Image (tube, rainbow, N blue to C red):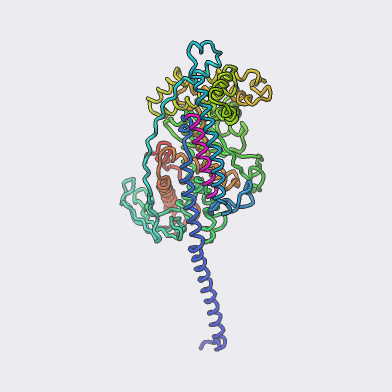
Amino acid sequence: MSNTKQPTYEELMEMLQKERSKNAQLLKNIEEKDAQIANFKEVVAPILKEAFHSTSLIAKELNKYCFNIDDLLIKDLTEQIAFTADNLFKWANLAKSYFLQTPMAPTGKDLNGNIPPQGDVDLEKAKEEQANVAGSLGNFITKISKTSTILNKVLGSVSEDRKAQLSKTQQAAVEISKTPSKKRVEKAKTKSKGRVSKTRNPDKVTNAKLDKNTCHCGGSLESLGQLKDKLFSHINKAQQLLQDTENLHDAAICNKCGHVHIAISEEQNVPVIPNRQLSCETCIDIGYASVNGIPLNKFVSALGRIQGFGNDTFYYNMHDFADIYIRPLFDMVENAAKRADTIQVDETPFDCLEAQGKRQAPADVTSLEIDTKNYVLALTAPRFAKEQFCLYYYLRNRSKDAIKELINKDYKFKTICTDGYPGYDALLKDEHPNAKHQSCLIHFRREIIKAIDPKGFADELDELEIPLAIEKLAKDFKDDNATILLFMVLEALSKIYSYESSMNSDSEADFKARVECRTSGPVRKLMDCIDTIMTKLSEGRIELRGSTYVKAKSDPFAKACTYYMNNRDKLRTFLDDGAVQADTNLVEGCIRPLTLLRKGIYHKVNPEYSKDMAMLFTVYQTAERVGIEDIHSYLRYYCHALFKHCYEKQWTQAYADGTHIDKQIKSWDMKKLSEGFDFEKWNLVNYKQ
């Protein structure tokens, strides 16, 4: 007979009461969890939905007011002013005020400047102010138009006999006035495809089946069972942004070579690394959001909170995603840039806290050079190059040594186009002594506009009657008035761009047309006229100190003269090479998305994350440049292929070592496993959809 003491009635009741309390607490926890999910669906999800919708609307508005600078430059001077001002006011009043009233508006103590709180924007007052400014602007445009018409009338009436009696500077101005512009050819508008739906994963268990029974070596496959991976997969629903997914993969082994084959269907997402919970598709969407100006913390804050992720889960997964999947694509784009004959280069500030000593560096970082300002360096090919690319680097500072670390001797370019920053002259002298340098004509044009003060000039003429205005302009022209001459330099630049825009494709015919027009045609003649005028205006205003021109006296035109004379030969490089563009417009266009993101985050935390950002921008922007319309599908198929390669390679080795299919492999060196993968098949620069 057992000696075990039986519990008394009171003890049984006490045990029952404890069990009831435990179940009640468990039920309460479940109810609280359900309440959190319900609250997320009712409150947070609609906010995120509105945020993404608002961002989409803003992007559409920005697309309306972002235009090709070449299309602007070929317009008449009056049209340029009216077009730019009209779009500037629309963008400033609509985009900014609307953006500040959305959940995506920047917040926090690290914001630069005084930004009003969300919703604190008086749209009616903004419209009233816009109307007042627009009225004033309209009067100004009328004055400029009047001035331009009178000036062309004065110079256009000069006969050839009279022209021969003028000074070389005056002859150059008359030549500019009489040189016809190239007739503008309207570009054919491409019809939008409209709304395009994307296939997303169903909210259920997925099951991938092997679609063949033979190995690549010719051997037959013997089933090993199924592998499972569980992950949180991003889908395009506001009510359910992350779903808990379980993937099943058929696995089989070749009885001849021992290679393990694993099925991954198109509908399945794959994790960044096996045993991780975030999918590659989620990282693809986060990358797309970042490139379009949505900060990572805005994208994931609610998602991480509702699923119980740690603060850095998304960040270290994005870092691994960039290192494993994006870096190989980046390296191939970089190789294309290194073998390009011509590159355009520009940089923009983008602070890195750790590099500026504003954040403690990790323990494994033994030495770190502190900089006061950090940058992102952008490189791109000219519009008519055969291989197109957009390459971004994290640049620790703007010194010549920092630039030389990135644009090193591996680059084989024959011509580099920049904004005139002296650091690139040092780069060419030390690393690329045989390369040519083209300085940007648009930057020169900006200096001219700053110097002539067109508003003051127009106001002065507007007070005069037409006959008196003509008389004044004729006298000013005779006296070599600097404003008149610089006004004609602007006219010459507009006409140069009217010719350049008519032959800007990569076709053989356009290349021959560029060579002819630049070698002995109107473009070279106009540049010669500009040189004559700028050389004359520089006399007495600037002086040579060493190898650099500096201002000799305080003069409103001295800065423009200094810029021209210091870049005189470099502004004419494109005349001798039909493959070189005259400006840095394309690379400046590559920088604009970075400035949009910078307004939302202002800095990156450390250099590694800055490099990740540069790689993401490189891949997404290059895809857009080469014409890949659906970057999401391209990256999804690429990630599937690379993951499958690594997955099978690891399991082939593990199974050979005796690891059973039901066991879990804890350590995955994805970079080493990716060796042998055919990355060239996915090369963005020459990828065929």
- Determine which quarter of the picture holds residue 169: top right
Residue 417: give x, y in percent of width and height: 52, 28
Q: Looking at the image, can residue 547 be seen?
A: yes
Which residue is farthest right? Answer: 553
Give the overall secondary structure of the magenta segment: helix
- The answer to which of 431 and 86 lies nearer the viewer is 86
Judged left or right of residue 310, residue 496 is left
| Viewer-side residue, 107 vs 32 | 107
- Count of labels shown? 0
Percent coordinates x, y for residue 515 in the rendering: 43, 21
Q: Quadrant of the C terminus?
A: top left
Measuring from the top left, give residue 232's x and y in whole percent: 47, 58
Image quadrant where residue 235 sits: bottom left
Q: Give the left or right position of residue 672, taking residue 397 as reference.
A: left
Q: Does the magenta segment cover residue 550?
A: no
Q: Position of residue 303 (x, y in %)?
A: 51, 58
Q: Quadrant of residue 687?
A: top left
- Can residue 433 be seen here? The reply is no
Image position of 479 with respect to 663: above or below: above
Magenta-span inclusion, residue 87: yes
| Residues drawn in magenta | 76-98
